[in-house]
Amino acid sequence: MVEVDAPRTGCPEDLIGAYALGALDPEDLEVIERHLALCERCRQAIADARRTAQLLAFSAPPQPVPAHARRQLLARIRAYPITAGVRFWLRRPAWTLAVAASLLTLLFGWQVIQQRQEAHRQAHQAVEADAQRRAVVQLIAQRDGLLIRLQGTGTARDAHGAIILDPSSNTALIAVEGLPRPATGQAYVVWLVRGDQFHQAGILPVDERGHAELFLSPRESLRTFDAMAITLENGPQVSAPNGQPVALATLD
Amino acid sequence: MHLSQPYRRILQWSGLARRARETTTELERASDELLVQRVVEGDIRAFELLYDRYARPVFSLAFRMLGDPGEAEELLQETFVRLWQQAARYDAHRGSFGSWLMSIAHNLAVDALRQRSRRPQRADFVDLATFPFHDIDERATALEAAEVSELRDRVRRALAQLPEPQRQVIELAYFGGLTHSEIATVLGEPIGTIKTRLRLAMQKLQVLLRDHPNGALGDG
């Protein structure tokens, strides 16, 4: 479309302020939007008017905000966990997502064709991923602050890893390696400890290589607990720890 | 380097651990733009600080437009939920964070007004009575962005300088969510008169507020 600098007399000046305020009726809206496609001067005038219109929002008489609104809002926010990875992709322009989707489609098609080679590749990647996981666990096990080292005891004395706490989102991630696989019927149970009370927080699943991960998002604030414990229990349905202690970490 | 999602999370959280050494005081001094970037990365502390700065103007706008504390509170929460979900859409080159957030709130309020078709007959219809709140959020009052208070005074002074008929149409359009024809009906005036009045009012407001572009907000 050829852009022209429309003469001022041909511009729907009466509509510019109302357009910026969102106060146009549908027929006027159609008129000005057709005009804006052709007139750079009016587009600039709209931008200026919109900046002024936006300032009106601040003129409302100040009112006190109810405190419970913050609590309810934060509870809602925690129900919308968006990982940094997802947020990163959401920041990309739409065309990059389209390109990424196309590339993924091509990749999957190629993988179907190359299935035999892929099997070898996957085996190699599994070994590589195993080494990387070990490296990551080693890395975080050396950290401090919100990274709490976790050292196994008893039959799990070779187990080590970390609890990563994020008080701001009231979540925790337990990552351990070197855990013996539990016998059939047994399970590693994670407990949150407050004083002499133990609250079951979940079951710690262990893979064939002894890696274990558990993501916790308890209803109660993690700040209110003194410690986190892992025990080996005869089954996951236990209300109090009776089995062998595997690890204990204080949460201060 | 291929890592499973949980281990990606470990790396992400390691970043959070480093960030935890940053004191709250340091973060409180951060600009809106930096806090928004932190929100994009999922930092709830940054999100709360932005809430502290802008909860009151958002809530006040919502109450001014909807006239109901409960509905205003819902709109306040919805505005900040959108911030949490869509922070990456904020572009500092297109204006201040405060104006961007208030635009979200205003659009939600206009949608609410138009959906329920229950609009005030006049922009000053709303009874700005004292709230029966027993639990006022003192942080949202104490930590409100200083620029918000200053801007509130400036815009209110500018509106007060408009002739009453011009101020009235601006308020009916912006706070009442009314269109040209609806304002004409409410005031019993020809639509052409309303169009001209609104144009003159906006032109005068632009002159009065020209030295205060909305980019002035958001310096933390």
Image (tube, coloured by chain):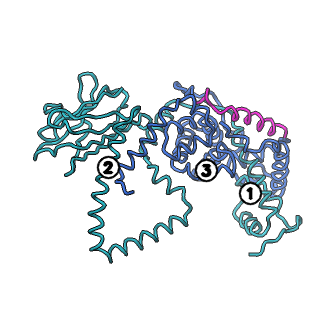
Chain colours: A cyan, B blue
Label 2 marks a residue whose chain is A
Q: Secondary structure at mark 1?
A: helix
Measured in 3D between alpha carbons, the distance from the residue under mark 1 to the one under mark 2, in whole angstroms, is 56 Å
Badge 2 crowding class, 10 Å Cα cut-off, few under 14, some 14 to 19, many 20 or more, is some
Residue at 81 percent across and 53 percent down: it is B194
SS assignment for the magenta stretch, majority: helix
Residue identified by numbered label 2: A133
- Is residue A178 among what the camera can see? yes
Chain to which mark 3 belongs = B
**Numbered disc 2: secondary structure:** helix
Numbered disc in front, either 3 or 1: 3
The region drawn magenta spans B140-161
Q: Which mark is residue B75?
A: none
Q: Give the chain of mark 1.
A: A
Tags 2 and 3 in contact by the CB under 8 Å rule?
Answer: no
Query: A206 or A218, which is in the foreground?
Result: A206
In the rendering, at what x and y percent does residue B43 appear?
49, 41
Residue at screen point 69% across, 63% down: A26
Q: Give the x, y percent position of residue A206.
A: 21, 47
Amino acid type, callout 3: Tyr
Q: CA distance from mark 3 to mark 1?
A: 22 Å
Q: CA distance from mark 2 to mark 3?
A: 36 Å
Q: Which residue is mark 1?
A: A19
Residue picked out by circle 3: B90
Mark 1 or 2 closer to N-term? 1
Tag in front: 2 or 3: 2
Q: Position of residue A4 (x, y in %)?
A: 82, 71
